[in-house]
Structures are given as C-alpha cells and as structure tokens.
Amino acid sequence: MLQVNPKVLLRLAELEEDLLARRKRAEEEQWPGEIDGIDMTITFLRTKQAEAARLTHRPTVHLGLPRPRSARN
C-alpha cells in the first residue's frame, strides 16, 4: 500500500483547491458526468490528506543498524 509523504500536504491542498474550482465550472456548464468524476477524485484526495496528516503525528521509531553477532566458542 502506498503512503503519502506528509511533506506533500501543501501540494494536496493546492490540488483540492483546483478540483473545487473545476467542480464549480462543471456545475455552471451542467456537466453531470464531470461533476461525478471530480467528486470521486476529491473524496480520494481528502482520504490521502487525512492519512498524511495522521502520519505527521505518528512518532518515528529508530531501529538502528543491525550488528553482527559475536562468535560463541
């Protein structure tokens, strides 16, 4: 499963703004198919935004580097 990097939250906000503007135009032009597609894309985008925001609050776990086992006699 792909995860969205939290660093792209600003870009996702820009994409959402653009989609909302496109949806408004589609409403004005009465393009119902386009509205449905944009609504679906907005839903997916907001899901990814929520996932990325959640990842920013998740603590980082440092596992360190693996070390060779010591030789046992």
Image: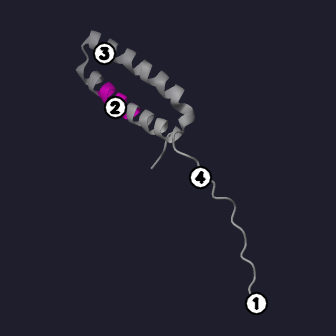
- Looking at the rendered structure, which numbered label has been put on residue 2? none
In depth, the one of 19 and 5 nearer the eye is: 5
Which residue is depicted at the point 34% across and 31% down? Answer: 43
The boundaries of the magenta stretch are 37-45
Which residue is depicted at the point 49% across and 22% down? Answer: 14
Dot 3: what SS?
Answer: helix
How far is the residue under mark 4 from the one under mark 2? 31 Å
Viewer-side label of 4, 2: 4
Left or right: residue 62 compared with residue 68: left
Tell me the residue that label 4 is attached to. 61
Tell me the residue that label 3 is attached to. 26
Can you give x and y, in whole percent of width and height, for residue 20 in the image?
37, 18
Three-letter amino acid code at the position of disc 3: Ala
Left or right: residue 34 compared with residue 13: left
Magenta segment, prevailing SS (helix, strand or loop): helix
How far is the residue under mark 4 from the one under mark 3? 45 Å
Q: Does 53 appear above or below 70?
A: above
How far is the residue under mark 4 from the one under mark 1? 34 Å
Within 10 Å of disc 1 (Cα), the crowding (few <14, some 14-19, many 20+) is few
In magenta stretch: residue 35: no
Can you give x and y, in whole percent of width and height, for residue 31 in the image?
26, 17
Can you give x and y, in whole percent of width and height, for residue 39 in the image?
31, 26
Viewer-side label of 1, 3: 1
Q: Which of marks 2 and 3 is nearer the N terminus?
A: 3
Q: Which of marks 4 and 2 is nearer the N terminus?
A: 2
Left or right: residue 5 compared with residue 22: right
Tell me the residue that label 1 is attached to. 73
Tell me the residue that label 2 is attached to. 43
Q: Which residue is at the far bottom?
A: 73
Three-letter amino acid code at the position of disc 2: Thr
Within 10 Å of disc 2 (Cα), the crowding (few <14, some 14-19, many 20+) is few
Can you give x and y, in whole percent of width and height, for residue 42 in the image?
36, 28
